[in-house]
Amino acid sequence: MRWPPCRGFWPMNAGSMPEHQARRKEPFQMLRRKECVEIFLLETAALFAAMLSGRYGAELAVSGGLALVLILLALTDLRCGLLPDRLTAVLAVASVFCWGWGSLDWSEAAAGGIISGGSLFFLRLASRGGLGLGDVKMGAALGLWLGWQAVIPALALAFLLGGTIALLLCTSRMCWKDSMAFGPFLAIGGYAAFLWGRQCWQWYAAYLL
């Protein structure tokens, strides 16, 4: 699937720009009403999911901030086939908010970033560029948020969703040379793992190991 030229998040038709130039553009300059509505609805759903997981107060605010950055990354990837370095950097730097709660220390965060980023970089090499470098950076940033325990189910869910959609598209006569944005699946898997990943790992360790 070849995405149409981006007209919403990137100015001056950035979808037709070389990747190294488009990444330098500010992704918030030309938000249209449609994108604003999409962001509002998705953010509301993300906050509701966070409350269902038992997050309130400061934890709810941090969950909402994470969701907002992931939504912007996912929608930009869908529109343009790009994951802006600025947003990925914000995602990585903001991960320090998780460390203050005591549930995730810097060593776990570093391990998560290395495991996630390293795994995706290996897949990028194995696929000869089939996986974008922006996906590798986004995965590494998510690993800093999640730690090594939660990032494993995050990647598993992302590849499960991405593989399922790719299979459905292939059965609908999608050309093998066409591309599909992986950022939205990383966003879904990462946010789900942020809310429930550690519980899933604890359940797995308790009942299956």
Image: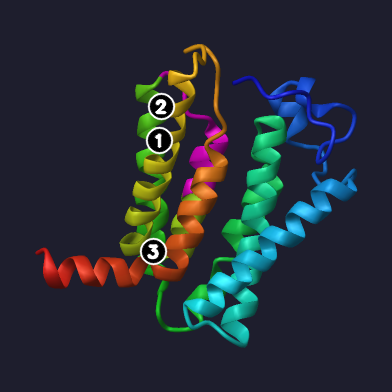
| Disc number lying in front (3 or 1) | 1
Range drawn in magenta: 128-139
Residue 29: image location, x then y, percent: 89, 46
Determine whether 208 is above or below 71 in the image: below
Tag count in the figure? 3
Determine whether 156 is above or below 200 in the image: above
Residue at mark 1 to residue at mark 2: CA–CA distance = 5 Å
Mark sitting on residue 167: 2
Determine whether 89 is above or below 80 in the image: below
The answer to whether residue 193 is left or right of residue 25 is: left
| Disc number lying in front (2 or 3) | 2
Residue 52: image location, x then y, percent: 50, 78
Mark sitting on residue 164: 1
Q: Quadrant of the C terminus?
A: bottom left
Q: Amino acid at mark 1?
A: Thr
The answer to whether residue 18 is left or right of residue 184 is: right
